[in-house]
């Protein structure tokens, strides 16, 4: 993803790193047959602890105004979910991700105890500690949590980030504390923003369907709300690495170039939101990444299917541009661009193998062949080791 496709190519790997990419033949090489080799996919927004939450998915009658009803289902599900069930959900989500060719994740972590499951997995990524707190007491507790979280060291393939959840659930002071801590520690932020019209109504008028949702939980405190989405955008330090999640109702004029938004196409469609102005965002120079979200709002954790959905619905986007949103651009979004996101000598040997689609001429652009077809990931390598081995080839 840092140059044109290489036909009949060869990748030489030395330990964890890519040593060379060329058309040379080497002793001991593995012939994978007619396949496409790509960088490992990077899913920058997941909720792995909700992998078993299919019962919460948006119903046919749901729409952007029904977003609080969906939140009610998710909260009810979380309240009955035991720690053991959360752990099992995370482990299942990691397996699903790997099978879909995802080698790097940006996961929203609700419980610090789930961190050990991430770091013991073969995948790499950023664990964004979720922070909630609209009332003064809850915000103060969350500030203590974020400081405790960042006081711990990163571990190997996993780094720590912060996710002050959303404008309807985070007090102004908590946003400031999270941004200050992230800037000081050099860690990324992930914030859900502009998910529904109900959120805009809440911020501007302190009314709407999110008010009773917050009241029922004893956390309604309008004095802690930021005034608007634009106000939150202006609070972010200039050099802070941040992922703006969803932004379903944010105008492209609100973000400056070089910022990052995360679009979850099939979740967006499931809620019946207005068409997403993806091309307008890109024309503005804003980095756009694709992600799956969690299984409380999405059918699976297959990032490639998100890319295929976008390719079908945005015909003006080239196939390689779409694939870049789950590889190169995603790596840059979470600060891993020096190590993953492209197949480049010196980078980590994270790659996926996709069989060439049957009946498609070999002269076809491989990105087009992937996105117009339905073939699944066949094999996955992380750090130069096959995690899902390729099928053996005859001869």
Image (spheres, rainbow, N blue to C red):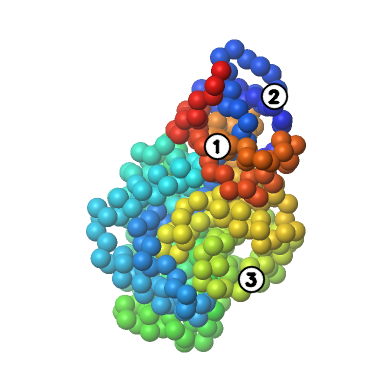
**Position in image of residue 327 (x %, y %):** 60, 45
Residue depicted at 36% across the width and 66% down the height: 55
Residue 282 visible from this viewpoint: yes
For disc 1, the neighbor class at 10 Å (few under 14, some 14 to 19, many from 20) is many
Please state which of residues 197 and 10 is positioned toward the viewer in this rendering: 10
Report helix, strand or loop for mark 2.
strand
Residue that carries the numbered disc 3 in the rendered image: 275
Query: Residue 193's spot in the image, x, y percent?
Result: 53, 68
First in residue order: circle 1 vs circle 2 = 2
Q: Answer with the quarter of the image where residue 362 lies.
A: top right
Q: Residues within 10 Å of mark 3 (few under 14, many from 20)?
A: few
Query: Could you say whether the residue bearing mark 1 is in a helix, strand or loop?
Result: strand
Q: Is residue 90 left or right of residue 323?
A: left
The disc, 2 or 3, on the residue closer to the chain's N-terminal end is 2
Give the residue at mark 2. Answer: 22
- State the residue position of label 1: 352
Relative to residue 148, is residue 158 depicted above or below?
Answer: above
- Residue placed furthest toward the top: 27
Give the residue displayed 51% in from the left and 87% down from the top.
Answer: 205
> Which tag, 3 or 1, sits closer to the chain's start?
3
Residue occupying image coordinates x 31% and y 77%: 217
- For image coordinates 57% across by 59% down, the residue present is 262
Per the model, the C-alpha gap separating discs 1 and 2 is 17 Å
């Amino acid at each position: 993803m840092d140059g044109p496709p290489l036909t009949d190519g060869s990748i030489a790997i030395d330990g964890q790193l890519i040593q060379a990419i060329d058309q040379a033949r080497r002793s001991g090489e593995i012939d994978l047959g007619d396949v496409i080799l790509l960088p490992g996919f990077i899913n920058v927004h997941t909720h792995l602890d909700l992998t078993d939450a299919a019962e919460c998915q948006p119903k046919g009658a749901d729409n952007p105004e029904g977003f609080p009803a969906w939140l009610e289902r998710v909260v009810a599900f979380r309240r009955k979910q035991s720690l053991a069930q959360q752990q099992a959900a995370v482990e299942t989500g990691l397996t699903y991700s790997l099978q879909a060719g995802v080698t790097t994740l940006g996961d929203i972590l609700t419980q610090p105890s789930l961190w050990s499951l991430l770091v013991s997995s073969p995948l790499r990524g950023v664990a964004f500690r979720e922070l909630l707190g609209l009332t003064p007491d809850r915000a103060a507790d969350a500030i203590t949590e974020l400081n405790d979280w960042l006081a711990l060291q990163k571990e190997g393939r996993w780094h720590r980030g912060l996710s002050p959840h959303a404008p309807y659930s985070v007090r102004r002071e908590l946003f400031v504390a999270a941004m200050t801590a992230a800037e000081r520690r050099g860690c990324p932020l992930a914030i859900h923003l502009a998910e529904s019209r109900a959120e805009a109504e809440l911020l501007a008028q302190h009314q709407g369907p999110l008010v009773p949702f917050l009241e029922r939980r004893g956390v309604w405190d309008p004095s802690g709300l930021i005034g608007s989405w634009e106000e939150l955008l202006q609070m972010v330090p200039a050099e802070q690495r941040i992922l703006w999640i969803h932004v379903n109702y944010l105008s492209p004029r609100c973000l400056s170039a070089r910022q990052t938004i995360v679009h979850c196409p099939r979740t967006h469609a499931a809620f019946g939101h207005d068409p997403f102005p993806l091309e307008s965002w890109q024309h503005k120079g804003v980095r756009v990444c694709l992600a799956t979200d969690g299984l409380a709002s999405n059918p699976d954790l297959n990032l490639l299917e998100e890319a295929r959905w976008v390719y079908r619905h945005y015909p003006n986007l080239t196939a390689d541009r779409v694939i870049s949103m789950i590889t190169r651009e995603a790596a840059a979004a979470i600060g891993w661009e020096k190590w993953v996101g492209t197949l480049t000598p010196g980078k980590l040997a994270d790659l996926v193998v996709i069989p060439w689609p049957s009946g498609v001429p070999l002269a076809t652009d491989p990105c087009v062949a992937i996105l117009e077809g339905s073939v699944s990931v066949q094999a996955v390598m992380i750090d130069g080791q096959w995690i899902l081995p390729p099928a053996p080839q005859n001869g």
